[in-house]
Image (spheres, helix red, strand yellow):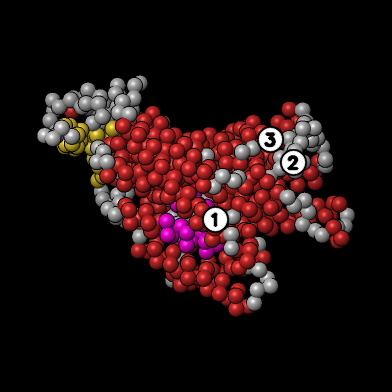
Amino acid sequence: MRVHGSGIYIAAILVGVLSGLICVAFRYTVATICSLRPHLFNHSNPLIAHLAVFSTIFIMLSATGWIVRRFPKASGSGLPQTQALLFGRRVYDKPFTYLLVKFAGGIFSLCSGLSLGREGTSVQMGSLTGYITASVLKLPPGKHRHLIAAGAGAGVSAAFTAPLSSSILIMESLQKVTITTTLICTLLAGGTASIIAKFITPGNIYDSIGVAMPANPQWQLMLLFVAMAIFFALMGRFFSTLLEKGKLIYARSGRSALFHNLLLASVTWTIGLFFTGMIGGDQTFLVKESTINSYLHPGIAGHPLLTSLINILILTLIIIIVSAFTILSHSSGYPGGIFLPMMTIGGLLGKLFYDLQLLIAGSWLTVSTEVPASGTLSGYFMLIGMSAFFIAVVRTPLTGFILISEMTGHYEVFFPTLIVGILVYYLTQILKVTPLNDLLYDFMIKEDVQQPQRTTIYIDAGYGSYFHNKVCGELTLPQGCRLVEICRMEKGKDGKPVNRKIPIEPQLAIQEDDSIGIEVNSSEIEQLYRALASFGE
């Protein structure tokens, strides 16, 4: 199938530049402010300094709460909000205002210390940038979604410096249908944003995780991968259930905003005192954990078995605290993603799995002779755990395989993440784990009471598609759908292209690049969008 209208690709690169600059500025600002935490939570600070830190956290959370109440579409992780924008379920009458408040709200919520990730905010800011760009360029409505998706991909790419997996994530988790034009736009925008991210934030903190590859026979490793997949499928099911219940309990608590902000501030401040790196979705916490072989001081270490049990108990406690704090933070509905905290949990679970198998089976794993000075088997399992837990909860296997390799730069673990990831995806399907974004999206639209009964969505008619050259009177659409509008780019009197609305007539033929407005029942947008979008491809 040929792809026409190369101008949309130039627009996608522009969206990549703009989204990259905005999201990298957001990433840099958050990282700079968060770097002050070790000084703010220093135990040698006087009591008045700690009280000042608590007050600052509370003020930031209160400001975030005000933003969310005043601009409800700026709340949450950003992925379901972007999906609603793609589907036409949500429309922004003041997109630039929402871009600003999402930027400010994301900084407040992450810098306050909540266990949230920068990627969710970046996705929504990127999608809004694409939406604004399409409006400024006066593109037909059907082409808006290409730039919305491109901006969302650029946001993920700027957050993770991962251009390929960012494009796959948009197709796999948000759009859930592969459209050639959208995919190319997303790749172009993601690659552009990644280049900008590389220039401004060139370092990779995950380089500090040393990886040693096991040299055991493949059949032994396959048995280990099966056990690991079962472990992570169960952990993913457990976490998804807790997250869903946590959001429901938080939403139905009936408590005041003051109570919620005091609760969040108290939990954040307390955890910050004892585990400073754990708050704010900080990646340095996971990297630091990868270097810890034992939580006990060498002087008090006793019997090896007892020492191992104590280490496992302490690590389990840390995982429980991080998981509970992440669920509480995300349930608040404050701006911020959940991917980075989940990767921290996944890495810690990978380390726990390694310690458990070491306790049960002993030192049966042999290490390859080609090992970096800092390489450990623990680091190997942590990276696999990051990917496996991501796939178990988000249920996007292609993204999970590639994202961890791209983000961390450890391509040597790609094959084991592929094997474990495939098994995890299959097992979570058996366990009926709801994909994370579907869970969050369903929760969001249940709370959305402003949606009209009927909604018009716009589809771009591609060359050679079902819509191309079809006569309106002969057009067959799914039940409940009605053709209401066709937008066509034509030359105006001054020779410049003008977007015109063409009256619907039975003998009117749909041309290539027409934007077709189709009215559907709002309750069926998600199911019909994918079918109609495929008709335009």
Task: Judge whether 84 appears above or below 66 on screen.
Answer: above
Q: Residue furthest right?
A: 303
Magenta highlight: main SS? helix
Q: Residue placed at 53% from the left, 42% from the top?
A: 198
* Image spot of residue 206 (x, y percent): 63, 45
Q: CA distance from mark 2 to mark 1?
A: 27 Å
The mark that comes first in sequence, 3 or 1, is 1
Closer to viewer: mark 2 or mark 1: 1
Task: Judge whether 90 appears above or below 174 on screen.
Answer: below
Q: Residue placed at 40% from the left, 56% from the top?
A: 102
Give the total of numbered labels: 3
Quadrant of residue 504 within the rendered picture? top left
Closer to viewer: mark 3 or mark 2: 2
How many residues crowd mark 2 within 10 Å: few (<14), some (14–19), many (20+)?
A: some
Q: Which residues are magenta?
A: 103-123
What residue sits right under mark 3 in the picture?
225
Quadrant of residue 411 within the rendered picture? top right
Type of amino acid at the residue the image marks with label 2: Gly
Type of amino acid at the residue the image marks with label 3: Phe
* Image spot of residue 126 (x, y percent): 40, 46
**Disc marking residue 31:** 1
Type of amino acid at the residue the image marks with label 1: Ala
The mark that comes first in sequence, 2 or 1, is 1
Q: CA distance from mark 3 to mark 2?
A: 20 Å
What residue sits right under mark 2 in the picture?
375
Residue 299 relative to residue 338: left or right: right
* Image spot of residue 46 (x, y percent): 64, 77
Q: Residue placed at 12% from the left, 30% from the top?
A: 505
Circle 2 SS class: loop
Q: Nearer the viewer, residue 136 or 105?
A: 136
Q: CA distance from mark 3 to mark 1?
A: 35 Å
Quadrant location of the C terminus? top left
